[in-house]
Image (cartoon, coloured by chain):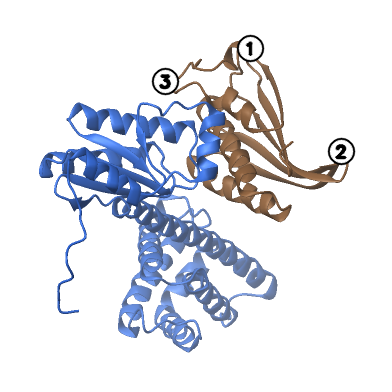
Amino acid sequence: MIVLSKEKLPIQREQDVVLFRNRIKELATKIGMSLVNQTKLITAASELVRNMLRYGGGGITYLEVVSKSSIPGVRLTFADEGPGIADVTLAMKDGYSTGKSLGLGLPGAKRLVNEFDIKSEPGKGTTVIIIRWKNGL
Amino acid sequence: MNKDTATYLKGKRKQILEKWMDNQVKDAALRDDLMSVAELQQQSEEFLTALLNAFGTPEAENTDSAGYETLIDILNEISISRARQGFSPRETNMYILSLKQVLGQQLEQNPALDPSKLSREILSINNIMDSLGMTTMETYIKGREEVILRQSNEMSEISTPVIRVWDGILALPIIGTLDSARTQVVMEALLEEIVATSSRIAILDISGVPTVDSLVAQHLIKTVSAARLMGAECIISGIRAEIAQTIVHLGIDLTNIYTKASLASALKMAFSMLNIQVTRGAKQNLGF
């Protein structure tokens, strides 16, 4: 996998979310992603970035354009230094939430992207990496 | 700063003010469309008096000291009002910077200062004026931020109109991101209007919402439940193809809520729920 471009965007306030989503849309449009794929990627990113704000107290995101066997895609990294997730398996279950939300953020985001990786250590923070390929496969 | 310098400058107040005003009026950045020269003169005089007084205090080089309090107050007032009046950062800062130049020139004419003393005094005046310039900028930006905040508040209010499309049918076009604060505004506006018009159906149109994630969906569901408690049924319209697919993958359950792709089909549904029939009658001359 080759990284074609990389940028960093800190997320501290709810207003940053809109800027972040617009930036993803620009990248996805640039590599020629279809509208449905774009919407799925942006929605997944929106879920994760909201989690980061709500539970992690904000953090840093990396937006990358990557390429694997000449198929481009967008890779997003969400890193926070919040309290972490005690039980990741439980957090990935539909309908589980420690807040008062629908509990669909993490599992839903996973279903909306092609590759999903979550690492969390209680007390140290959470890092989520997602990739959506241009062809959506 | 030397006490004698402060006294000297105080004695030359009139000349300094004259030159400073001259500089400001000559400068291309003067905005006499935003502020009259007479007003500027008065403002500058007030400012200079406070500055020269502050120079005479024991802690003249520390702009955080008590001697500068009045001066900083005046400066803040000037910056804030300039930010609101639409001055550019350059025009705002020019005010302080042009005075710095005049003070330096005035000191050069002081016969009591030898070159080494002169450079020391000018340096200390420069430091003070730079620090004041920084304060100006900070306050200016604060003023601008206030303007932005006010605008975003206004936007969230004006962008949630509740429209009465038919007797008993309300429509609410939602445009932009639906965060917690917006939802609150939307919900309040809708519920109030339901009471005021005793409407039975409300159409929430989300064509203008760019991203529907689980938080937005949750807010929508809450709004629908609240409307139901008041005896009104909601129809969510404007669900685009890509949003429909995304909602399914996210796993959001909207089966209990009436949803339609377009506002037109939602209106049609509302008509049939209220047993209203719209028929095409014989052609009439309506005068247009």
Q: Image check: B248 left or right of B208? A: right
Q: Image check: B239 left or right of A4? A: left
Look at the image and tell me whether residue B137 can be seen: yes
Q: Is residue B16 above or below residue A76?
A: below
Q: Which residue lies most toward the front here?
A: B282
Quarter of the image where one finds residue B182: top left
Pick the front one: B149 or B226: B226
Look at the image and tell me whether residue A57 can be seen: no
Instruction: Evaluate whether label 1 is on the same chain as label 3.
Output: yes
Answer with mark 3 or mark 2, whichever residue precedes in sequence: 2
- Is label 1 in a helix, a strand or a loop? helix
Q: Quadrant of the N terminus of chain B?
A: bottom right
Answer with mark 1 or mark 3, whichever residue precedes in sequence: 1
Quarter of the image where one finds residue B147: bottom left
Q: Amino acid at mark 2?
A: Met
Few, some or many residues within 10 Å of mark 2 (<14, 14–19, 20+)? few
**Which chain wears blue?**
B
Tell me which residue sits at (50%, 43%) in the image. Answer: B211
Residue B24 % position (x, y): 46, 82
Pick the front one: B107 or B80: B80
Question: What residue is disc 3 on?
Answer: A100
Question: What residue is disc 1 on?
Answer: A89
Observer-side mark, 3 or 2, equals 2
Q: Tell me the subunit letter for badge 1.
A: A
Residue A94 % position (x, y): 54, 17
Q: CA distance from mark 1 to mark 2?
A: 28 Å
- Is label 3 in a helix, a strand or a loop? loop
**Which chain wears brown?**
A
Answer with mark 1 or mark 2, whichever residue precedes in sequence: 2
Pointers 1 and 3 in contact (C-beta within 8 Å):
no
Question: What residue is disc 2 on?
Answer: A1
Tell me which residue sits at (18%, 49%) in the image. Answer: B277
